[in-house]
Amino acid sequence: MSVLNPSPTGLQPILKPQAHHAPGNFITKYIFSTDHKIIAIQFLFTTLLMMIVGGALALAVRWQLAFPWESMPIVGPWLFAAEGGQISPEFYTMLFTMHATVMIFLVIIPILAGTFGNFLIPLMIGADDMAFPKLNMLSYWFMWPAIACFGLSFTFAGGPAAGWTSYPILADLAQAAPGSGTAQTFWLLGVTFVGFSSMMGSINYMTTIINMRAPGMTFFRMPMTIWGLFITAILQAFALPVLTAGGFMQVTDRLLGTCFFYPSGLVINNAAPTVGGGQALLWQHLFWFYSHPAVYIMLLPVMGMVSDMLSCMCRKPLFGYKPMVISMSAIASLGFIVWGHHMYTSGMNPAVGMAFMVATMMIALPSAVKTFNWTATIWGGKVQFNTVTLNCIGFLSMFIVGGLSGIFMAAVPVDVYFHDTYFIVAHFHYVLFGATLFGVFAAIQFWFPKMFGRMMNEKLGKTHFVLTFIGANGTFFPMHFLGMQGMPRRYADPYLHGYLEHLLPMNQFMTISAIVMGAAQILLFINIFYSMFWGPKAGRNPWNATTLEWTAPSPPPHGNFDVLPVVFHGPNEYAVQNGDHDFLMQTEQECEPPKPAETDENNDTDNEQETSR
Amino acid sequence: MGKGWCLFFLFWPIAAVVSCAMAPWIGWSFPYDNAQAASNLGIRIDGLFYLILVITAIVFVGTQAAIVYALWRGANNREERADCVHGNHKLELVWSIIPGIILLFLAIYQMNIWADFRIKKYYPEVAVKDPIAEVTARQFEWRFRYPAIGKKLQQKPQPDDLHSVNELHVPFGKPVMIQLRSDDVQHSFFLPALRIKQDALPGLQIPVWFEANKPGTYDLVCAELCGWGHYKMKAHVIVQPEDEYQNYLKTLTEQQFYDGLGKIAATENDSESEATEK
């Protein structure tokens, strides 16, 4: 099935030089590997492992909300023998703090940048490896000190309990809460280590994409996946240092008493800290300056990957390649100036709130453009209903819900009511679970044959998708109603309040859905491990896709390509009307161009084609 | 099987629309009676919410229907190859400009509500002149400090101030303002029934105004994570007619300054506190 077609053009294939850092032994090949593909697989398994941890924490949170103060099944009597197996409020705060931390810092960001960034960037641009292979290795191994710090923070009294946002004063002064002691310091160190890891990755991705593209691979011939990862790397490189600086300031506040974030005159636990003069609002500005762009760091790579996968699975060129690139860049650049919409109720100048509101409203626009373009990509296609497509549609339909509920949040007066209620929780779970993870599931299924040389099981994949989709909607959609009814986030026992008493059955329904969703992930793990060893063997190009990675053997050897690929046109050239197959790989040159100049440098011609159609 | 999947994807938007349409009738909407806000500003906020809900519902139904229809067509596609379309500038201009206009309209439309809500210049004068209480959040309770009857709230606590915990009384039908502060960590003053929310930030004193339009007892909860006891920071705001409110202040004065002999001790301090006021 291989479609390596290097020279219908008459060009001689360029033989690749010997790979420059071929591994010598088991340790350099599989553990301290500098090969981007091995590092990607290391990231994949680490993040999947962390997904189990993060998911278990979420299920514990849901247990408490459905059956408050009842003994937690299986682990309860073992973990909290003293409390009769029930979750204490201190432990509950730690549960959701760590759920968010693990999912964001150890699952979503590393699975996108670490796994897919690493695996796909060199392969899709036709490079033999990353620009800095050793830095790449280091970026993986810096995950482990972070995991160790987060793990250690569990062991101190209460665990970190200030939420993933780590707002001062709660997170800044050790006496503020049981979990604000050493656990919080370790939590901050963990975030710093993750930051280092991401930073090394993003420098590497930017350098590689800018410098190491194959001959002919201009910027506007790069697949959307690469655009998504490239823009994400830029976002990360500019936003992350701010969080790291903020985190460092918080650590010095805690350990050296620098008081950047706490004012004077506080009385905590009947004791007054001796000094002050800081401002709690400063942290929120620093934190959200990173953490709002982080939302796009967790979304843009998926948007890119889904664009490529949808186009392949519908056998149609991506609708509006350039507008897609531009809207992606617009989302990223607007992403830098909208952090204030997390702070409408914070007490910052309300006039600033208005400016942030207008910018936030405008960010909905490129997102809408992308949604319409994806729909138009499906329109008129030959849709192949396999697991990849289903997960992509899952991504799309959940992204629409998450995007639209974002408009409520952008509207300041409405946000004031919804802020810190479950409506917000619904919104970001639709975006981060609904959109991002469905995109990731699709991407795993799509690139699995390239990673391991074998196909994943379709039946298991579809069952996993259906159960996850039902579970996710059952868990997250009712959260909108909880939010409307005014149920605040992070409440261990909302039923204590008269106006929330009636919400118990709804929460129980959501917990059952969450258990279904969690159980469904077992199928994903079975599918991955089974297919890795016993799946049917895949050829070079099992999906009949067009981008460069499919010209390499599956799995690609060290150094990736047997011949250096030369690129002749943009990605996603499907539905080609003449020739023996309906797609044109990027390395293939059209024998006789069906219509005048179909290169994407000349986008105006697209218009004419469209009208003539 | 393709059509089966189309039906699968069709089911969810229908379920979403049906449950949203049912929400107000089965008590899944805003809290309290009739899901209507207990303040005039709150009613305007609800109006804005419903406007956005209608717009987003139309977009939601439209996009989901388009996806399902496109899938349905794609599943039925008997042709050998898909349509070769790279894009359509006119179409893309249309679907960029129309949402752009709608979003800009929404942004401008809500500015008035936000200004009335939070920009100090637009606060009702009555409320600004005479804040009724200082609200201090602390782990894990709400403390209220009213000025003595007939006096104005001072920046610093006065000896004749009235204090209460977890129960704020406010007069009905007129705009009132409170000064919000926090003693320890960050809290958030959340009155769901009135659609009021404002963070209490340590080191800052933030004025918050609201006007309840129907008497009743409303929950006051904390919306910002403030430690392990966050969920039990529970208080009530009791909205009552002016005379009942004045009676309450009197009772509070009596309780607070009752020296066991039937004399109200506060009166002794009157001349002193008047002096400090000036």
Image (tube, helix red, strand yellow):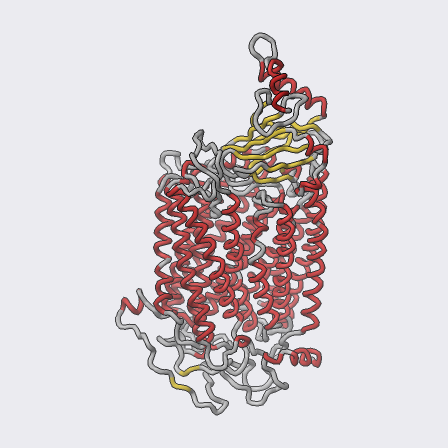
Viewport quadrant of the C terminus of chain A: bottom right
Q: Who is closer to the viewer here, A494 or B165?
A: B165
**Percent position (x, y) of residue A378?**
61, 70
Left or right: where does residue A455 sit relative to residue B170? Answer: left
Direction bottom: furthest residue: A10
**Percent position (x, y) of residue A96?**
47, 45
Direction left: furthest residue: A25
User: Image height check: is A194 above or below B141?
Assistant: below
Q: Is residue A45 visible from the viewing direction of this image?
A: yes
Q: Residue at x 72, y 55 (%)?
A: B105
Q: Give the number of marks.
A: 0
Q: Is residue B75 visible from the viewing direction of this image?
A: no
Q: State the image quarter where residue A46 is shown.
A: bottom left
Q: Residue at x 51, y 76 (%)?
A: A545
User: Image height check: is B270 above or below A471?
Assistant: above
**Percent position (x, y) of residue A351?**
64, 48
User: Image height check: is A206 above or below A346?
Assistant: below
Left or right: where does residue B223 sit relative to residue B66? Answer: left
Left or right: where does residue A598 sit relative to residue A141? Answer: right
**Percent position (x, y) of residue A143?**
37, 57
User: Image height check: is B244 above or below A613?
Assistant: above
Direction top: furthest residue: B261
